[in-house]
Every structure is written in structure tokens, then in C-alpha cells.
Amino acid sequence: MNYKIPIETSARHIHVSQKDFELLFGKGAQLTFQKELSQPGQYLAKERITVQGPKGHFENMAILGPFRPETQVEISVTDARKMGVPCEIRQSGDIENTPGCVLIGPTSSITIPRGVIVAKRHIHMTPRQAIKMHVKDNDVVFVITKSYERALIYGDVVVRVSKNFSLAMHVDTDESNAFANQEEPYGIIIKLHEDASYDVHTWMEELLEGINR
Ligand SMILES: [Zn+2]
């Protein structure tokens, strides 16, 4: 069973801890709801902040609610260059040994020691959809994308399964521009190998060794 997986582009944004948010916006400050996002319970807040790196900064960065245990800034590889921070491609929440930055809010600015990541592209789905697509949580899959002039097969796409998710693939602005489909962005999981989970790195190593699966 193949599903059309809607592809959603995540522009640069930040998830904040309550503690950091209160430092930036004042004691007792709360996130103000602006718009629901595709994943249940997640929303865009009205508040905006400036995110400063050693080389450059971004003003008016969107904050996504609700609060998280730890502050995390999600940017693209292009953004990382502009800010002057090393690019760390990580799954959300995996922020050990990632660069920090300066956050500037209306009340004060703070330095976070870590948390700046380029999110690893991923697909959210429910357990039922995972069964139908023959994948499981944390599988790494290939996704063929619908495009008109720039078809792409994405490797290294992580599958995330939870009953609280709704079906969507999340890519950043660089990845979204790379396959250039603004009108009908969707992808389909393709099996290039017997194993449901197969990464490009292993595949290349095998090809170099003369193994053609
Ligand atoms: Zn996501």
C-alpha cells in the first residue's frame, strides 16, 4: 500500500523551555497561540525573537509551542552558514554537543550553550499507517518526491511513529527548494532494497566494493 505523504516545509523556528521564555519575555510570560500546525497539539506562537550567531542573525524567528524541556533552534544548512555556526543534522531533542547561540527577546538576551540544529528530515505517521506502509519507528527510508523539473529521491529519511502524529513529511527550506514543488508537494516511500531500513551510506560502501543488490 503506497500513501501520498504530504511534504511540509519547516522554516527556521525555535522551541523554547519555559525558563528561557520567561527570561526573554519576563517572569510569568506565556506563549500566545496564533495558529495550529499539522501535528496535533503543536502551534505557532505570536511571540518572535532574534537569534544571533557569531557571523549573522535572524530577526523575528517564529516560536512553536508548547514549551519543551530544553530550548532548540531549528535552521537550514544555509541558515547555519549565515549565522556562522557548525551544521549539526539531528533528530529533534538530540542536542548534545550542538552549537549554542544568543537569543534576544524584549526583556533580555540569553546565551544558550547548545541546541542549534538542522533537523533531520522525517515523516510523522500513526501506527496504523506504519503497518500499511511496512515501516516502523526509526526506520530510515527513501522517499521519491513529486516535482515537475527537479525530481529527487531523498535518502536518510527517518520514520517517526506515534498515535499522536498525523501523516506528513517535514523538510527544511533548503530541502524543499531542492525539489521545487510549491503546488503539490508530496512524496512516496520507495523500497530500493529488501530491508525496510537502508541508508545511502551503506549502499555507497557496497557499490564501491562491487556489491550490487
Ligand atoms: Zn516534524
Image (cartoon, grey):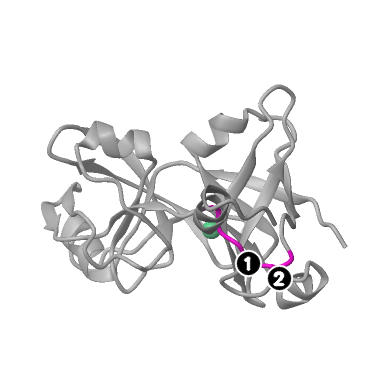
Q: Residue furthest right?
A: 1
Q: State the image coordinates of residue 21 (x, y, percent, origin top left).
A: 25, 61
**Rendered view: 21 above or below 75:** below
Q: Residue furthest top?
A: 149
Q: State the image coordinates of residue 9 (x, y, percent, origin top left).
A: 56, 42
Image quadrant where one finds the C terminus? bottom right
Report the span colored magenta: 194-200
Q: State the image coordinates of residue 182 (x, y, percent, origin top left).
A: 66, 30
Question: Mark 1 highlights which residue?
Answer: 197
Question: Mark 2 highlights which residue?
Answer: 135
Q: Would residue 199 be counted in the magenta stretch?
A: yes
Label 1, residues with CA under 10 Å away: few <14, some 14-19, many ≥20: some
Q: Residue furthest front?
A: 210
Q: Secondary structure at mark 1?
A: loop
Which is nearer the eye, 29 or 212? Answer: 212
Circle on res. 172: none
Image quadrant where one finds the N terminus? bottom right
Name the main secondary structure of what is drawn in magenta: loop
Which is nearer the eye, 34 or 101? Answer: 101
Which is nearer the eye, 91 or 69? Answer: 91
Residue in the image at 63% along x and 59% along y: 141
Is label 2's Cβ within 8 Å of ligand 1?
A: no
- Earlier in the chain: of badge 1 and badge 2, it is 2
Contact, CB < 8 Å: mark 1 with mark 2? Answer: yes
User: Which is closer to the viewer, label 1 or label 2?
Assistant: 1
